[in-house]
Image (cartoon, grey):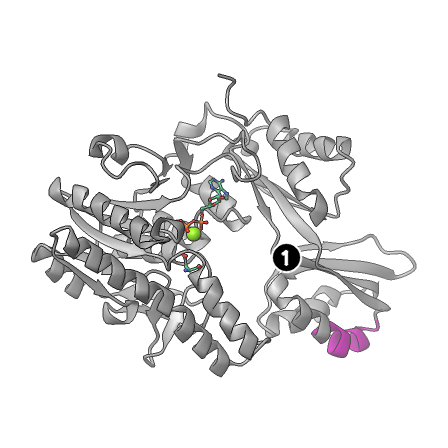
Amino acid sequence: MALIVHKYGGTSMGSTERIRSVAQRVAKWVRAGHQIVVVPSAMSGETNRLLGLAKELMPQVNTAEAMRELDALAATGEQVSVGLLALALQAQGLQAVSYGGWQVPIRTDSAYTKARITSIDDTRVRADLAAGKVVVITGFQGIDDQGHVTTLGRGGSDTSAVAVAAALKAAECLIYTDVDGVYTTDPRIVPEARRLSTISFEEMLELASQGSKVLQIRSVEFAGKYRVPTRVLSSFTPWDIPLDEEAVSGTLITFEEDEKMEQAVVAGIAFNRDEAKISIIGVPDKPGIAYQLLGPVADANIDVDVIIQNVSHDGRTDFSFTVHRNDYARALDLLKAKVLPAVGAADVRGDAKICKVSIVGIGMKSHVGVAATMFRTLSEEGINIQMITTSEIKTSVVIDEKYMELAVRALHKAFGLERPAA
Ligand code: ADP
Ligand code: ASP
Ligand code: MG
């Protein structure tokens, strides 16, 4: 008997029929003798619908008061899911109880719309499990010190599940989704993408942080910090497939680096359409300029990702960086109104039609020429690289958004990541 956390995403919870199938699957695990905690997402489309309604009433949200309400609203999607799923489980003849994050409680900080989990009280959940119940807990949310409901950022149910698994010291966290594992890239963009049976924690972390939405980055961080065995697998197999088969399907995140030695240099390709580029033209090139430009941006709580400064001519240089698209308008306004006059730069320009494409692999640590292959491939496709950034295990380029799919496909091919021909 093991304690296992199951997480079901939006598509997996997308209709009462799907929810019934989730309940049947969970019942299979329970009848095999396991203790199961289930963390579901809102039904597919529901979080977007709720946030869309909010937008009709308040197009730009930039006060803490309004963000509090956004979280209170968005959290209801998962509240519906846990109620329905607990009913479906009871209909299968199981004992089941549902909780909102606030009832567990799952405590978070107060950063509305991107709160971080600070602690999880396992008392109540353990007592229910000991009493033979399946415990169903809302994904995506918690409660702060003042008792306000918070949410963890889009895709946050992954993080709820892994954090609950860590708190309960669960034997495994199974992330059930609409693909049967982690692929070399998003199979929606490259149909030839190949499923990886294992992926190292470091690579998964980098893929998630470079925009691969199959797992929210913080869930991977939790998995690493608490060494939670985490597996991504499909909820779209027939619910009654043999449990032994299901338990080893999908993609397991591994923590042993050595395992990767024999494998491909590049494990996968991620892309991110959520950023925008800002360029400040004709900046006086003198010490402290980066701080003068980016200090006020950081003070406004805007995260900066890729940064480049050009070679200077006649004492002036151009400086470019990327921010999340949600922060783009605010960053541009701030620079135009306050920073530009203060530093004496000539102009500030923005481009929201960019994307970032990243190749990721532990093998890049020990292989030279990987980045060169990336640049050559993009050049052969006539794709201009606007910015480049590297780390030990990734190389990212910022390119025009309209070339994103072309770039990902070409790189996937260039690094031989396709499925072997049948
Ligand atoms: P859920 O609602 O179950 O959380 P998500 O839509 O958040 O599902 O994540 C699953 C989706 O992630 C897949 O449908 C797929 O399109 C996308 N995805 C992006 N990159 C990858 C990848 N490398 N491997 C698998 N899926 C990926
Ligand atoms: N329902 C939330 C979202 O759509 C959380 C999640 O699905 O993980 O972002
Ligand atoms: Mg998700």
Q: Where is residue 292 in the image (x, y as percent from the top left)?
A: 72, 71
- The foreground one among 266 and 88 is 88
Residue found at x 40% / y 50%: 11
The answer, for residue 92, to whether it is visible in the render is yes
Q: Where is residue 336 in the image (x, y as percent from the top left)?
A: 77, 74
Q: Position of residue 338 (x, y in %)?
A: 74, 78
38 displayed left or right of 13: left
**Depicted 144 relative to depicted 97: above or below:** below
Please tell me in which quadrant of the rendered image residue 45 appears: bottom left
Q: Residue furthest front?
A: 17
The answer, for residue 33, to whether it is visible in the render is no
Residue found at x 23% / y 67%: 104
**Depicted 18 relative to depicted 325: above or below:** above
Please tell me in which quadrant of the rendered image residue 189 appears: top right
222 displayed left or right of 82: right
Secondary structure under badge 1? strand
Task: Say which amino acid is labelled 1.
Answer: Glu
Q: Which residue lies furthest to the right in this view?
A: 314
Asked if the stretch drawn in magenta spans residue 55, the answer is no
> How many numbered markers are drawn?
1
Q: How crowded is mark 1: few (under 14 residues within 10 Å), some or many (20 or more)?
A: many
- Determine which residue is flagged by label 1: 275
Q: Main secondary structure of the magenta part?
A: helix
363 displayed left or right of 291: left
* Range covered by the magenta-colored residues: 334-344
Q: Is mark 1 within 8 Å of ligand 1?
A: no
- The foreground one among 262 and 382 is 382
Residue found at x 9% / y 54%: 132
Q: Position of residue 324 (x, y in %)?
A: 61, 61
Asked if the stretch drawn in magenta spans residue 338, the answer is yes
- The quarter of the rendered structure image containing the N terminus is top left
Residue found at x 45% / y 72%: 112
